[in-house]
Image: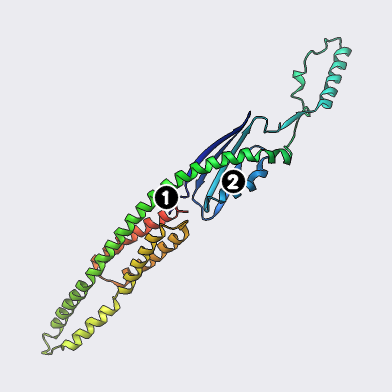
Amino acid sequence: MAWSMTGCGEGVASDGPSACRVELRSVNNRFFKLSLRTREGYSSLEGQAEAAIRSRVRRGAVQMTLDLTGPAVQPARRLDAVQLGAYLDAWQDFCAAHDLPSPHTVDALLGLPGILVDVPPDVDSVQRAWPLVSRALDQALDGLDRMRKAEGDALAADMRGTCAEIRSLADGIRRRVPEVVAAHRERLVERINRLVADRGTTVSEADLAREVALAADRSDIAEELVRLESHVAQFDRLLDDDSPGRALDFLAQELGREANTIASKSLDVDIAHAVVEIKARIERLREQAQNVE
């Protein structure tokens, strides 16, 4: 069945005081692409997250937001006690030299350079958080799939309706073709009669039939109509397949080519109007197909 590439999902998991929240957002993209937004040091989980997402998402640009809290998160900063002690000794020496009271707290020193040092989490602690992340990610993927499926069902229903409209318009063109040939014959006879009226000559039925046959052959669109209807039927069937987006996009292009050929070969106004309506619906199919995985 057709799945949309657009959707979002959220998952939350906890392990004692530790908690993890994962948010997924997916939009259209020709290929699969993942971007991970998380705290510093945890981007190393992107490979595992991508493997889990790829198992359920084939195409689309997916943005994953990962937030970890609690003991599972290694502190990002540590206190440099040696540097703090050096600052404190210098402060006390200054106070003693100038007969000032010694400081009772170190609050004023914590903002000085080198006191709080950034510490990236080690690989082992990051990997220990993966089971918790995995559970939250599975929940987020479930929510993403529900939204993608619901939108995919709506897209498929809309495209099936559009396919039915194209078939109806193509049937109208097929019924119109004999009328076009008959009308061309009448115009041809009228034109010839005007030309030969003053010359006392006549045109044989064989010559007239040959001219009509040549005109009908030049404007014959039977093959194009067959291919058009075949592409529409295949488009309809593909909506039941798994991940048909690229095939649908290709068929939409082929439908456009057949419609253009029909328009170029037929000089009838009614057929031209019908082709314009068909091309408008093909463009709609093409735009909708770009939303399908």
Dot 1 or dot 2, earlier in sequence: 2
- Judging from the image, the colouring scheme is rainbow
Q: Residue furthest front?
A: 16
Residue 91 figure quarter:
top right
Three-letter residue code for mark 1 = Gly
Looking at the picture, tell me which residue is in the foreground, 170 or 241. 241
Question: Marks 2 and 1: in contact by CB < 8 Å?
Answer: no
Crowding around mark 2 (Cα neighbors within 10 Å: few <14, some 14 to 19, many 20+) is some
Looking at the picture, tell me which residue is in the foreground, 59 or 117. 59
Residue 43 percent across, percent down from the top left:
66, 43
Residue 285 percent across, percent down from the top left:
38, 57
Q: How much space separates mark 1 and mark 2, taking CA atoms?
A: 23 Å
Name which residue lies at 57% across and 38% down: 136
* 133 displayed left or right of 225: right
Name which residue lies at 85% across and 24% down: 86
Three-letter residue code for mark 2 = Ser
Residue 78 percent across, percent down from the top left:
76, 29
Question: In the rendered view, would you say 222 is above or below 113?
Answer: below
User: Residue at label 1?
Assistant: 152
Residue 221 at least partly seen: no
Residue 185 at least partly seen: yes
Question: In the rendered view, would you say 82 is above or below 290?
Answer: above
Looking at the picture, tell me which residue is in the foreground, 160 or 130. 130
User: Residue at label 2?
Assistant: 35
- Secondary element under disc 1, as helix, strand or loop, is helix
